[in-house]
Amino acid sequence: MTETERPGRRASRYLPAAIVGTVIGFAASPASATTSCSQLASSFHRPNTTITTAQSVPAGTFVTPTTPPQSITGLPDFCRVAGFTTPTSDSHIGFEVWIPETGWNSKYLQVGCGGFCGAISYQQMADPLQRGYAVAATDDGHQASVVDASWAAGHPEKLIDFGYRALKETTDVSKAIIKAFKSAGARRSYFMGCSDGGREALMEAQRFPRDFDGIVAGAPANNWTNLFTGFLWNERALSATKAGDLSQADVDLVSNAVLAQCAGRDGGLSTDKFLNNPLACKFKLEKLSCRATNSATCLAPDKIEAIQKIFSGPPRIFPGYGPGGEANVAVNWPLWILGPGNPALSLQGLFGNSYFQNMVFPNSGWNPNTFSIEENLRQARIRTGAILNSVDPNLQPFAQSGGKLIQYTGWADTAISPQSDIDYFKAVNEAMGGPRRTSEFYRLFMVPGMAHCGGGPGANAFGQGGATGPNPSDPESDILSALDRWVEFGRAPEKIIATKYRNDDRTQGVAFQRPLCPFPKMAKYEGRGASTTDASSFECSRDEGDHDGHHGRDERADNR
């Protein structure tokens, strides 16, 4: 700890004066256990809670109780507690808590889920445990495929469990279990999630503002009703094309044209395979239009129209996707928007249709063409908005309790438009009295070239969801460590160094690094012969361009 670092406002509440100056680290001495791990199965009691497993797991490899099983390697010895809670007669909220047997850092981390959840996020629990955290996760109250919401039809209590109650149940039971196993409870509590986990993260800050000292919200699906209505918009736009589905060649053509026009003119490098700042790219899609049918160098008018609708998004409902980040088969449009020959089979199509069929219009025979886009949104808000959306910009209770919030998203995210993050960030700034006040507890980081939660051609590893940089304990290059330092010592992150590994494989070494900057600052290459692979060659600076962006849209997304 440097002389300028001091404990944050919550330090006096949790930290004995004798150890206020202790460095962050992850090797704090554990408290003495009051109950053995196996005894928790019989000794732990909480209303509406059943412990099904309490076992000491030796260091090494843990095989998950899933079908098929997964092997998670490199774990320390830990106490594994699994169970479920039943806050209502139609609830069955599964949870797991992993507590280090030795080397506990006296901190608790709860991880979020993804999609419609339906399973414990075992892989997400591994990295925090390796760092010394006690960690917990929940299945959000049901067992199902991540794209399947059929469990919600006719089960309004399960919908509430998924929306927010499973989060609170897991928080409370996990903290109680940790306290039962150790001589004291966790000194710090954190939440970290991406996608639906990002929605959950913002739900925690808004609905349960005193439960966590720090929160990391990645690519949040927090404007759920509007986001999923946007999925329908994209599906309809593609279904209306006359010349056939958009092909890989079509999106390659668009992507290459975007890069040719904008790469290197937005603060990045001309050799980048991604946009450094998509808001600076004023791409003219109509220049790729053919008069009639496709060719190798142009697109038929109906395909141009469909792409433009996806770029723009449904007016006044949700921002669009583009330009930039269209072509990658594994993480971009082919996976999320186009689908294998049918947009209804894309991830957006699967999620959107299952949501409206099972949560908004259960057992009604609904299909994507039953109602107008506007009516679908209206009913979604009436029936599920108060349960699923976490769009309240008033974070005053969270800020007053000393909480810190870091939000991030990839500029090449084609699951959830990155402009949605900017819209929420701006709304919070307005509600909280402006950027100066907001920056004291909340910062947003936009990640050039990163897809949804990770992946993509940009520098995409900075400690999010286990995607660690070369030094996970370094707050300068790890988002969880940066959050921990902000909470402990009041030192807000001014930048976070993100890493691109060769072939996204950490064992193959570093390809390049880039700084992530707190929005609205952007990283810009300084040139003058500086290294193109070293983060120090880029500086965070304010771009005076249009930060409302929306890629040509005149309307702001409606976040109500």
Image: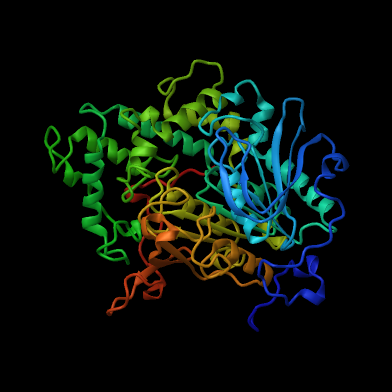
Q: In which quarter of the image is residue 475?
A: bottom right
Question: Residue 536's x, y, as percent?
Answer: 40, 75
Query: In the image, 358: left or right of 320?
Result: right
Q: Which of 373 and 145 is in front in this view?
A: 145
Q: Is residue 314 visible?
A: no
Q: Can residue 554 be seen in this view?
A: yes
Residue lying at the far bottom in this picture: please name it.
3
Question: Residue 133's x, y, as percent?
Answer: 68, 58
Q: In which quarter of the image is residue 5?
A: bottom right
Answer above or below: position of 174 versus 478: above
Answer above or below: position of 128 versus 353: below
Question: Residue 235's x, y, as percent?
Answer: 37, 31
Q: Quadrant of residue 435?
A: bottom right
Answer above or below: position of 366 versus 198: above
Q: Which of 134 and 273 is in front in this view?
A: 134
Query: In the image, 116: left or right of 207?
Result: left
Q: Which residue is drawn at 40% across and 67% down?
A: 513
Query: In the image, 478: left or right of 31?
Result: left
Quadrant housing the N terminus: bottom right
Query: In the image, 267: left or right of 486?
Result: left
Q: Residue at x 56, y 68 (%)?
A: 436
